Amino acid sequence: MSDDETEPLDKKEGKFHPRLLLLDEFGGELHGKKKFHKCLYHFREDSEDISVDDWTFTHDHFGPTEEGLSKNLLALDNLNLIVIEKDGKKYIYKETEKGSSFTQGLRNGLRKLWGDEIQEREKSLELVAEVNKDRSASEIIDDWKEQKEEPYGIDQ
């Protein structure tokens, strides 16, 4: 990555690989790009130590979206950590066996390095997956519509 490109998360946050960990919390399979965006936003909002400046989302008619998510997911696909499939208009993201092993190793390493901090994030990711697993992106968006309308409830 060149110096003039910005990362969606700062270097410290990037160490936590929230996208891959979230996919793992969904049992290794998540249906829909919009749903992925909304769940990451939900995770960011629930994480007290991640500020809107550290991880920005833009807001459009689909609700909050993370710039660069597709590029990050393609990189994970190129590393054979996930597989991206398309079913009609809907994308399906599946964790591979290699991705599952990598995620488990990542979790173990992060627990040793970050201790309680990563455990709080794991709980937050687990909660986001539990709450949203059987919901559509539209249902998740409804939860965040009020925030979009509030002047201080969205990224400025």
Image: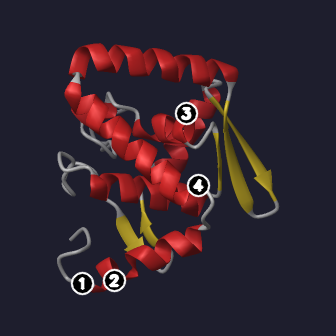
Q: Is residue 103 visible?
A: yes
- Give the alpha-carbon distance from disc 1 to disc 2, as whole Å: 6 Å
Measured as percent of width and height from the top left, residue 110 is found at 32, 20
Q: Quadrant of the N terminus?
A: top left
Question: For the residue labelled by badge 3, is the local secondary structure a helix, a strand or a loop?
Answer: helix
Question: For the residue labelled by badge 2, is the local secondary structure a helix, a strand or a loop?
Answer: helix
Q: Quadrant of the C terminus?
A: bottom left
**Mark 1 crowdedness (10 Å alpha carbons): few <14, some 14-19, many ≥20:** few
- Give the alpha-carbon distance from disc 2 to disc 4, as whole Å: 21 Å
Question: Is label 1 in contact with label 2 (beta carbons under 8 Å)?
Answer: yes
Q: Vertical placement of 59 versus 84: above or below? A: below
Pair 4/3: label in front: 4
Measured as percent of width and height from the top left, residue 133 is found at 58, 55
**Mark 4 crowdedness (10 Å alpha carbons): few <14, some 14-19, many ≥20:** some
Q: Going 20% across and 82% down the picture, which residue do you hit?
A: 151
- Give the alpha-carbon distance from disc 3 to disc 1, as whole Å: 34 Å
Q: Which mark is residue 133?
A: 4
Measured as percent of width and height from the top left, residue 120 is found at 27, 37
- Given the image, on which type of amino acid does mark 4 rest? Lys
- Given the image, on which type of amino acid does mark 2 rest? Glu
Measured as percent of width and height from the top left, residue 66 is found at 41, 57
Q: Which mark is residue 75?
A: 3
**Mark 3 crowdedness (10 Å alpha carbons): few <14, some 14-19, many ≥20:** few
Question: For the residue labelled by badge 4, is the local secondary structure a helix, a strand or a loop?
Answer: loop
Q: Earlier in the sequence, mark 2 or mark 4?
A: 4
Q: Quadrant location of residue 53?
A: bottom left
Q: Which mark is residue 146?
A: 2
Q: Vertical placement of 18 versus 130: above or below? A: above
The residue labelled by disc 1 is 150
- Give the alpha-carbon distance from disc 2 to disc 3, as whole Å: 33 Å
Question: For the residue labelled by badge 1, is the local secondary structure a helix, a strand or a loop?
Answer: loop
- Given the image, on which type of amino acid does mark 3 rest? Ala
